[in-house]
Image (cartoon, rainbow, N blue to C red):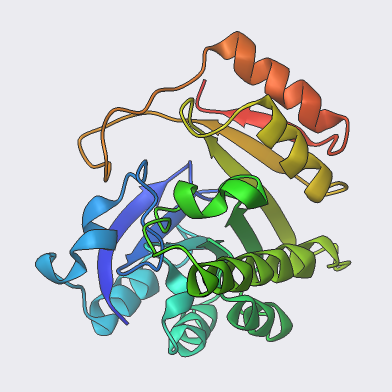
Amino acid sequence: MLILGLNKTTLLDYPGELAATIFLGGCNFRCPYCHNRDLVISPSSLPPYSLEEILAFLSKRRGILGNVCISGGEPTLNPDLPEFLGKIKTLGYSIKLDTNGSNPDMLKLLIDERLINYCAMDIKNSPEKYLPTVGLDSSPEGADADSGSDTLMSNIKRSADILLSNTDSSFLYEFRTTIVKELHDKNDIRVISKWLSGARAYFLQSYEENENVIQKGFHSYDEETLRSFAAICREYIPNTYLRGI
């Protein structure tokens, strides 16, 4: 478990709740517009927190904080994630997981074992544009590349189905897409919203460039366009909202 960041207090990461956010290092995607470059590209360059430090902090904040967000990087790459979340649970916290959905088996385990209360799954793009959007389109063309794409999308769709089929009203989830002008168009938005039809909540997040992105030069859409995208989504997902505008 490579713990590389701790935001001790946030009102943004756990919707409607005061929370702390823990950032885990490493990711299997290379989304060029990602804001956590060092966590993804060079996690070993960052000073780690020990498990003892994190648990001591959370123990002291009981009664002040009630929620913890686990983000990354991609948290589900860590095989010891269930044990880590179990330790946080024993302190009485509700836990939100941020995930790219590439590890459906881990996601299902965490839900089945009630180790998370909330899941936010990133939907990067329409299926046919997933690989370039997540920075994995540099593989040689041919059968191996096609197989990799099929496996990735199979896992992503399995994770989405796990959330879409969940009927436990006490378990919260959302899907979210960061909208980038160079990567997403109106057709992509319609394809995604049809795919996720009936989801409990879907958020369109406006891209914002900063110094920590993996690749600079991307742009956001104007507010009017983003609102038109949200209107398309609401044909299939009534609970569609905008973030970051």
Q: Is residue 5 above or below residue 132?
A: below
Residue drawn at the location 27% of the way across and 77% of the way down: 2
Vertical placement of residue 24 versus 20, above or below: below
Relative to 125, say whether 242 is above or below: above
Q: Quadrant of the N terminus?
A: bottom left
Figure quadrant of residue 22: bottom left
Judging depth in this view, the residue of 97 and 134 nearest the camera is 134
Q: Quick check: can you spot residue 41?
A: yes
**In this view, which residue lies farthest toward the top?**
224
Look at the image and tell me whether residue 15 can be seen: no
Please give left or right for residue 127 compared with residue 99 in the image: right
Residue 230, given in percent of the width and then of the height, sits at 72, 25
* Residue at the (47%, 42%) spot, across then down: 11
Q: In percent of the image, x 43 and y 55: which residue is there?
A: 137
Task: Please report the residue visible at 20 percent of the width from the left and 67 percent of the height from the top.
Answer: 43
Question: 126 or 4, which lies in front?
Answer: 126
Point out residue 105 in the picture as x, y percentages from the top left corner: 64, 83
Q: Count the marks: how many?
A: 0
- Front residue of 141 and 158: 141
Residue 16 in picture, x, y percent from top left: 61, 43
x, y percent for residue 241:
69, 31
Image side of residue 51 versus residue 31, left or right: left
Q: Quadrant of residue 42?
A: bottom left
